[in-house]
Image: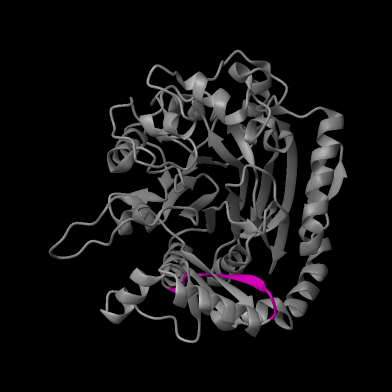
Amino acid sequence: MKRTHEIRMAMTGDSFITQRLPRDDASLQAIRELLMDADVRFTNLETTVHNFDAYPSAASGGTWAASRPSVLKDLRWLNFNLLACANNHSLDWSHNGLLQTIHYLSQEDWTFAGIGSNLAEAGRPCYLDTKNGRVALISVTATFENWHRAGEQRPDVIGRPGINPLGHHAIHYVPDRWMQVLKQIDQQTDIDAKANLDIIEGFKSGNGGSFCVGGAEFRLGKPGTSTLMDRGDAERIGRSIREASRQADVVFISIHSHEMRGMDKEQPAEFIRQFARFCIDQGAQALIGHGPHVLRGIELYKGCPIFYSLGDFIFQNDTVERQPAEFYDLYHLDSDSTPADGFDARSDHGNRGLAANPKVFESVIGSMILENGRVEEIRLTPITMGFDKPRSGKGRPSLASSSDGTRIIGRLKKLSEPFGTKISIREGIGCISIRENQRVSELSEDGDRNGEDQSMETDF
C-alpha cells in the first residue's frame, strides 16, 4: 500500500516589514497560531536587510526598501520558515545591500530563494525538509531593472550578484495606417537614431518582421497589446523546476510581478498566465504570485492552483528608517527634509497612492493540503492591515472581522470567476474544492487551446 504524504502549507503575499512587531499584540498572536498549523509557512520578503551601511542605488522599486536585521527575528516568531526574495526592491541598495541581505538571512539560518552572488545561486531551488516531506521553492521576479539580473559565472569571470529574472516583452498591434505614421515619426525625428545605428554596427540585432520606435515593438494587426515571457529565462527556470521535482516531494514557484493588463492592477499581464501554466507543465504543484499590492484572481490548471497575487501580508513602506538623496529629489525636497517629509509629499498626507487605497490593506492567507504531491483543499483566510490606523500602526496583519472578511472573499471570488474558479464561503473562510472545480478547469483548458493561449504557446 502506497504511503500517503500530507503536507500542509500556509502562504502569504508581500512582507514589506520595516518595524519590529509587538509580540504581545493579540492580533499578531492569532496570526502566529494560524500559521503554526502548517508544515510550510511562506512569505515574500520585500525588503533588503542591513544597517544602512550599503550604497543606495540611483533608482528604486518605488521606495528604497531597507530593514534592520532584527526584523528577521520577528518573521521567525510569526512562524515563517520559507522565504522568497526575488522582487523589484532586491537591489534598492545596490549589490552590497543584496549581499548583506544574503549574509543576514544565512546567519539566521533561513531557507530562501531568488537572490544570489551569481545566476546559479539566484536561480537554484531551495529545499525545506519537514516531517511530512520535502518542499522545493524557486523564486522569480518579472519586475526589475535590467542590471538587477544575476550574472552567469564563467571560467574566467566571476558572476554578478542579483535576482532570478523572468524577462518579458510587449508587442503592440496596429493597423497599416497607424504603422505608416509611426514610420514617419521614426524617419523625421531622432527618436530611434542610436538604436538604428546600433543595429547597423552590430551592437544589437533587428526584430524580424516587427518595427520598433521609441523602444516599443509594433506589428500589423488588430489594435491591442500582447506580452510574452522571455524564452531563455523560461527555459532556464524550467530546468530548475525539473531538477527540483526529482529532489523534492512538492515544488512551488514564487513570482513577484507588478505587470498588469492595461492600467488594472487586479489583472495579471498575459505573459504571467503563460508562465504560470508553463511552470505547472514543467512539474510545479503551485504558483504563488505577489507584487501589485492587491489581490488577483486564482486559477486552477491541471488541478494545480495559480495564485496570481496574494496581495500584502505586512505593508510598512512609509516607515523605512532612511532614504537616499534621490528619494527627496523626486519630491523637490531639500537636504534638511526627513523621511516623514518625503512620505507625506509622496502620498499627499495619505490622500493618494498606495497609502490611500484600502485594497492594499486587505488580503488573504492561503492554506493548502497536499496529499502525495497533489492539492486536495484550499482555504483562504481574510486579513486586514489597519487601513484606518495612523502611519505608525498601519500595515500589520490581523484576522478580518466578519463583515470585512465577507467583502474580501467576495472580491476574490469575482476576480477568480474569469479563470473558471469557484470559491465558496464557509464561516467567513474562502474555500476551493479541487474536485468540484476540476471539470470547469478542464473545460477552460479546452477553450484556451482554441483561443488566446494557442497564440501564446505558439510564440513560445
Q: Is residue 47 visible?
A: yes
**Front position in the image: 320 or 407:** 320
Q: Is residue 251 left or right of residue 90?
A: right
Tell me what residue is drawn at x 43 percent, y 58 percent.
165
Tell me what residue is drawn at x 29 percent, y 50 percent.
161
Where is residue 102 drawn, in percent x and y? 33, 40
223 inside magenta stretch: yes
Quarter location, residue 349: top right
Where is residue 115 drawn, in percent x and y? 37, 49
The segment highlighted magenta reads: 222-231
- Classify 57 as above or below 257: above
Where is residue 81 drawn, in percent x and y? 49, 38
Where is residue 76 drawn, in percent x and y? 49, 29
Q: Residue furthest front?
A: 188
Q: Is residue 64 left or right of residue 156?
A: right
In which quadrant is the N terminus drawn?
A: bottom right
- Classify 371 as above or below 215: above
Quarter location, residue 72: top left
**Front position in the image: 263 or 72:** 263
- Classify 44 as above or below 70: below
Q: Residue furthest left?
A: 156
Q: Is residue 77 visible?
A: no
67 inside magenta stretch: no
